[in-house]
Structure formats: C-alpha cells, structure tokens
Image (cartoon, coloured by chain):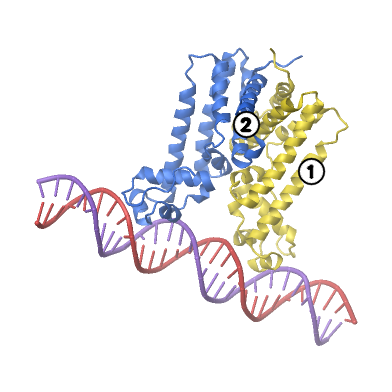
Chain colours: A yellow, B blue, C red, D purple
Amino acid sequence: MVGSDASPQRRLTKDDWTDAALAAIAERGVAAVAIEPIAARLRTTKGSFYWHFANREALLDAALARWEERTTTDVIGEIADLSDDPVTLLRRLIARVIGMTERDAVGPALLATAGEPRVSSVLARVTAARIDLIVSLFQRMGFPPDDARRRALLAYSAYLGHGELAHSTPGVLPADPDERHAYLEDVVLILTGRPHR
Amino acid sequence: MVGSDASPQRRLTKDDWTDAALAAIAERGVAAVAIEPIAARLRTTKGSFYWHFANREALLDAALARWEERTTTDVIGEIADLSDDPVTLLRRLIARVIGMTERDAVGPALLATAGEPRVSSVLARVTAARIDLIVSLFQRMGFPPDDARRRALLAYSAYLGHGELAHSTPGVLPADPDERHAYLEDVVLILTGRPHR
DNA sequence: CGGATACCATACGGCTACGTATGGTGGGTC
DNA sequence: GACCCACCATACGTAGCCGTATGGTATCCG
C-alpha cells in the first residue's frame, strides 16, 4: 500500500521501476524485488524493464540508493536544523516516529536481509549517520561523550524497535492520540533524565 | 551459522528438518524455507522430507511453533523467577540481550515477514507475553500501571532494536566487555530512573 | 531367514522467475 | 509524410522449486 499500482497506459521511467521496487520491499521484503511480478503491477512487461535496467541486481541497487538518499537527506537534514534546542529536536525526532503508525516499512525489511552485502553496506551508512546525529543531540544537552553515545544507542535501539512493533504487532502500541502523546512525553523524559543516585 | 550442516549418513527425524528450517530462517529469512536447498544442506533429498511432512507449510508451522515454545519457555520462564527483586530481574533480562552479540536471528527475520498470517500470529503471542512480563516488573518497582506499561514498551522496543543492531550493524555497538557492562548499567539506570522535574 | 515397515533416492510434470532476442509502435524531427 | 529512435510486447530457452509417484535399501521382528 505505498505507491499504488500506477496508471495503465503511459510510458514508464527508470524511477517508476525504482519506486515500485521500494514498494515491493516495503510490503514483502527484498525477495519481492522480482521483475515479472512488478511488471504486472505496473501493467507492463519485462520488455520495459530490460530496456531501463541491466538486470535484477541493478534494480535492487537503484532502490537501495534511492532509499539511502531519501532517508539521510530527508530525516536527518530536516531534523538537524541545529537552531533549536536539543531537547526539542529530540522530541521532534521521536515524534516523527511515534506519530506515524504506518511507517516506512523499507527499513525493517532491509534489517531482515542484512546478510546480503549490498544491503548491509547501505544499512551501515544510514545507521551510523543517524546515531551520530543523536549523539550530537545528547552532547549538546550536556552529557559527556561516552554517556551521550550510550544514550544515543539506547534511543536509536528504541527507534528501531518501535518501528518493528508498529510494523509487526501494532496492537501493543497505544492507539489513542492522547496516550500516544503521553508516551512520547514519557520517552523523552526517560531518555533525557539524569538517573537518581 | 547455527545448526551447521549435519552428519552425512544417518537417518533423519522430523526435528532435524525443523532445526534446519530455523537455521535457514535465521540466515536468510522465511523465504529460505525451501525444501530442496535444505535437503541439500542435510545431505539428503526431498524423498526424506515428504515422508516426514505434508508440504512446505507444515515445515514452516513446525519451525514457528518450535521457536515460539523455545522463546517463551526459555527466556520468560527462566527470568521470571519472581523471587528476586524486579530491578535485578530487569538487569538480568537486559544483560541476556546485551550479553550475546550473536543473538538468535530468528526473531528479526520473523519481524520482517510479519505480513504472513502464520508468522504474525506467532509474533503477536510472543510479543504480548514478553511485554506483559516487563510491565509486571515495572509495576513491582512501584510504577503505576500506565507508567509501567509505557516504560515496558520503551524497554521492549529497545530490546528489539538492539537485536536488530546486533544482527545488522554490530559495529556500532560497544565491543569491549567493560564498555558493554557500562552500557548495561546505564540502560538500567535510565529505564528505571524517575525523571527530574 | 523371510517379510514387513520405516525411511530414502530418483524421475517426472508443472509453475514461476530470469535473461535474451526480436519484432512492433508511437511521437518527435527534417 | 518518411524516418528514426526511444520504448515496449511477445516468444523463447534455462533454472530452481514444489509436489507426486514409484521403486529401493536398511532395520527390526518373528
């Protein structure tokens, strides 16, 4: 349920195929990047595909590259406004996750296929960039570097895990908007709070 | 890298096939539960498989059931000794996760295939059981029910996410044992600490 | 030691996906 | 209006996997 099924009768571009591949990944995993099924969804045939791409691998690479770019540029670039105070930024970052129950399902799908080298290298870059951003937020809150890194790891783990929950068993997450907001506030307080001695 | 490839020349049991299927899931996802490749790994043929099982679905069901049983019995039963104090239990629970870098990779693989009904029902049960356990821990620490549930959600999200990180990009996690221990202590303190006003 | 039963190998047909080859078609350009 | 080239459909051969059918071997049991 991402890019829908495309209009019937117009010419396709390389990007149409890439988007369809990402939609397939989001729905049924990397293994679902198969030319003929996607062609059927796009209401075209392999003939179109093999004009735009050399083979299946090329399509997968293009999809991964597109996701990497979108993910890093959008999320990180949009958040890291660095004019606001770090707690606000962290809250915004977390809200972005908690807010959308229907998240981008590509990330989870890729995590499951971390075995493939192509996938794992993309994942490594995206993960590192995101964690570094969160580390910098905690540092700007006054946490010493080691402490900041541990908190960032915890925060990012929670981010990933929340995504998995939303995608796999959304029933356990708060459905009511008020509860979601309370949860968000609680998470921020817990992650930013100095523990009692 | 779980069950290795089995000895060459003895008779196989149903459980041998089930274990091999779980190993396949751990390595390459649910889609890797394919009879002929697994048969090759077990150094036998489909003839063996179709004597023990009706079809591929039956094998997948058996593998999922086995994982569910192992997961709930082992982890929950072993932790929920309920004689110790809840903070110790939580620490033990978290340590079990942080401790093994090489985790059981079946969980992450299943999360990725939450689309399939068979997978999702197993996941729902396991997830609910685990979260309920953690909720009870926080309640026994004195947190009111709503608060306890939110903290449990955060803790379980972190659990899942940590597993994903360990499985996909272990490089970002602390490698040094001392650092791992410091991380564990920090996580416990953060998750159990009352936030400052 | 002869038969029955449990377990396995092999061969087959059907399906689906990959990749290639080759022949359309339609919208720009002179 | 002839042409060309970007773009697509169709047909083909190959390969991997499913599920069935059927025959083979090993082990137990009387």
Name the element at disc 1. Answer: helix
Is residue A1 shown to the viewer in this render? no
The structure residue drawn at horizontal position 58% and vertical position 53%, both measured from the top left corner, is A31
Q: Label 2: chain?
A: B
Which class describes the residues within 10 Å of circle 1: few (<14), some (14-19), or many (20+)?
A: few
- Circles 2, 1 touching at the beta carbon (< 8 Å): no
Q: Is residue A129 above or below residue C25?
A: above
Label 2 is placed on what type of residue?
A: Asp
**Local crowd size for mark 2, using a 10 Å CA cut-off: few (<14), some (14–19), many (≥20):** few
Left or right relative to A152: residue B68: left
Residue at numbered disc 1: A74
Q: Write down the quadrant of residue A91 in the picture.
A: top right
In the drawing, what numbered circle is on residue B164? none
Residue C24 lies, in percent from the top left, at 69, 79
Name the residue at 35% across, 56% down: B47
Q: Which residue is pictured at 53% across the width and 48% down the height?
A: B28
Q: Which residue is mark 2?
A: B176
Residue A118 screen position, x and y as percent: 65, 52
Vertical comparison of A159 with A197: above or below: below
Mark 2 vs mark 1: give the one in front: 2
How far apart are the alpha carbons under marks 2 and 1?
34 Å
- Quadrant in which the C terminus of chain B appears: top right
Position in image of residue A60 (x %, y %)? 66, 56
